[in-house]
Amino acid sequence: MAFRPFENTQVSLLNLQDEFNKMVNRIWHQGVTTGPFDGQEWGPPVDLHDHHDHYELYVEIPGVDPTSIDVSYLNQVLKIRGEKKVKTPSQEEGMVIKQERRFGTFCRSIELPDDIKEGDLTASYHDGVLEVTVPKSESSKPKSIKIDIQQSAD
């Protein structure tokens, strides 16, 4: 029997691009090995939200000691570094049969727009999620413009 993976599926460049994007997203951001791309063992997933007056960045890093996390900002790049330490069972506790979780050091670099207040960045850690709040500068916030309504003389 011949192997025909696309026999019942319509093949198009758009479908192939979509599948490739999904694969890269899983490899790059889902906590799987990213070594071929950036030289590190794993990378935590990141969400970046744009709000009216600030950006919020969420990094999913359960099991990481919050005191070991380093957040820095330089030249429009926000860097988050840390380490998730592996717990190796002792001889009495047994042996590892399966291990899918990733451990080791990580560094995520996120390029931010240049419209932020550098000195006002804040970070908090709760339930395994690091949240970084990045306020926008006043010049980048939308401004309401008052409309001058003139009455016509009839």
Image (tube, grey):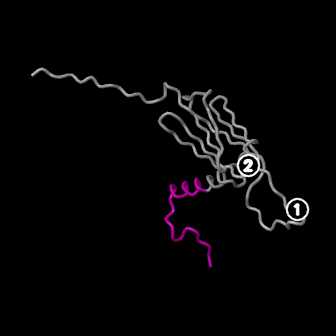
Q: At 52% from the left edge and 56% from the top edge, which residue is drawn?
A: 13
Mark 2 is surrounded, within 10 Å at the Cα level, by few (under 14), some (14 to 19) or many (20 or more) other residues, namely: some
Considering only vertical position in the picture, is 20 above or below 83? below
Percent x, y of residue 128: 67, 50
- Residue 3 sits inside the magenta stretch: yes
Place of residue 58 in the rendered image (x, y in percent of width and height, measured from the top left): 61, 45
Q: Secondary structure at mark 2?
A: loop
Whether residue 54 sits left or right of residue 83 in the image: it is left
Q: Secondary structure at mark 1?
A: loop
Query: Is residue 105 left or right of 19 when viewed as pictured?
Result: right
How much space separates mark 2 and mark 1, taking CA atoms?
Answer: 21 Å
Residue 39 visible? The answer is no
Say if 13 sits above or below 83 in the image: below
Please give the range of residues in magenta: 1-22
Residue at the spot 81% in from the left edge and 56% down from the top edge: 87
Amino acid identity at mark 2: Val
Query: Which residue sits furthest top?
Result: 153
Nearer the N terminus, badge 2 or badge 1?
2
Image quadrant for the C terminus? top left
Q: Answer above or below: position of 18 versus 153.
A: below
Task: Report the front residue among 71 and 3.
Answer: 71
Residue 78: x and y in percent read 65, 35
Image-based side of 29 in relation to 9, left or right: right
Q: Quadrant of the N terminus?
A: bottom right
Q: Which residue is mark 1?
A: 90
Q: Which residue is mark 2?
A: 64
Foreground pick, 106 / 16: 106
Compare residues 59 and 107 and report the one nearer the observer.
59
